[in-house]
Image (spheres, helix red, strand yellow):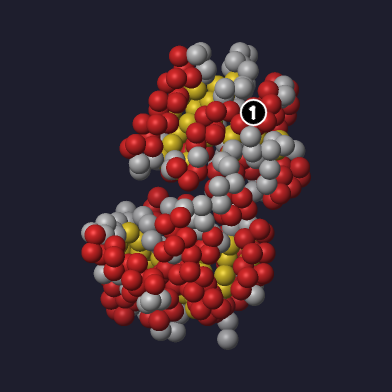
Amino acid sequence: MQILVLCAANIAKNPRPSRMVGFLKDAHQVSAMGIASESIDGALVRSYSPYKKRNFLQEIGLYCNVFLHRWDRLVYTHNRLEIVDFLKERCFDVIICHDLVLLPIVLAYKKSAKVIFDAREFYPKQCSNNLRWRILFAGFNHFLCKTYLKKADKILTVSQGLQKAYMEQYGINSEVFYSLSKFYDLKPHPIEENTIKIIYHGSANPERQIEKTIEIMDYCQNRFSLDLMLVCQDPKYQQKLQKMVEERQKRGCRIRIIPPVPFEEIVPFSSQYDIGLYALPKANFNLEFTIPNKFFEYIQARLALVVIPNIEMQEILQKYQNGVVARSYAPKEIASTINALTHEEIKRMKKNSDKAAEILNSKHNQLKIKRILHEITQP
């Protein structure tokens, strides 16, 4: 089959679309299109231009378009017209769309292609803690969901919480497609006698409130160290976090910010640690109900996990006995959960993650997408 994977990012560095290309490229002719996308072995990669920052008049125009509900002007931006041109030139059997704002374009120019939409967010509440976003884009995303989701042939999403939200608000059936990492043939790293090493890795922006993760170390025993491997596009925010870390280092706190490694090296690099930490506050709906990529990457790295209260993550950790859930989102409470762990408990959890890694890997998703493709393309 001729398959297009489309997203509003660099596909090679975006976990879900990148893995989707990996699932499909050996059995199908796969094209991948994203913003400033880098090459991917086995796929034909096309790029479209990045968004240009609006000037003052364009910003006023945006507010006018939102006020007048001229939603097509928010969809068909200058750079996205490059997608239109590409779709006019090509014919695909299946198009897998990874961003809501691109879905109207895909549906308008798909020709005979079947369309799979990967709803990795609950888009009506995507950035609900941001006032500007609520004013400009909450109504827009609601319109897109109400109008276009029902026209896709298949909807995927990242968790049961988001699946339930789409059903309750839009009557949309979706299938949970966890962000499972590929399988890595690793073994649990031995725990050092005097240092239990914790890692947090991921994007850093004000919405994620990484400050709260740093504050956890104010209450942790000195036998624990924390490395923050952050990808931050905001220099001011990066400086703020660095200052917080340096202040704690002066007090003898074992914490540091380390440079990020390439996407494919995240799991092998993380395997030298003992605990994978996920402690982001529930700043918005999606952070509260999602299961992030790093959760499954920590498991592949054979780590013990410490996470905030999240029903789905808790169910998985209880099933595999490979981590613990804090009683609240408060940094002091999360630190208390960490401090209660013994060497033997962490060692046992790492061994259990080793067993879970054999099951919770992307091979499961590869079989699932194979079934879905068969279902939607059969007459």
Q: Pick the residue in front: 334 or 195.
A: 334
**Which residue corresponds to the image point at 51% horizontal and 13% vertical from the top-left?**
252
At numbered mark 1, what does the secondary structure look like: helix, strand or loop?
A: helix
User: Could you say which quadrant of the image residue 247 lies in?
Assistant: top left
- Vertical relation: 51 (above or below) 243: below
**Which residue corresponds to the image point at 33% horizontal and 37% vertical from the top-left?**
235
On the image, the x and y values in percent for residue 195 come to 59, 17
- Vertical relation: 110 (above or below) 330: below
User: Could you say which quadrant of the image residue 95 lies in?
Assistant: bottom left
Q: Amino acid at mark 1?
A: Lys
Q: Is residue 255 left or right of residue 307?
A: left
User: Could you say which quadrant of the image residue 158 lies in?
Assistant: bottom right
**Which residue corresponds to the image point at 29% horizontal and 60% vertical from the top-left?**
51
- Vertical relation: 206 (above or below) 59: above
Total numbered circles: 1
On the image, the x and y values in percent for residue 94 come to 47, 74
On the image, the x and y values in percent for residue 269 come to 48, 33
On the image, the x and y values in percent for residue 259 come to 39, 32
Which residue in the protein does label 1 denote?
332
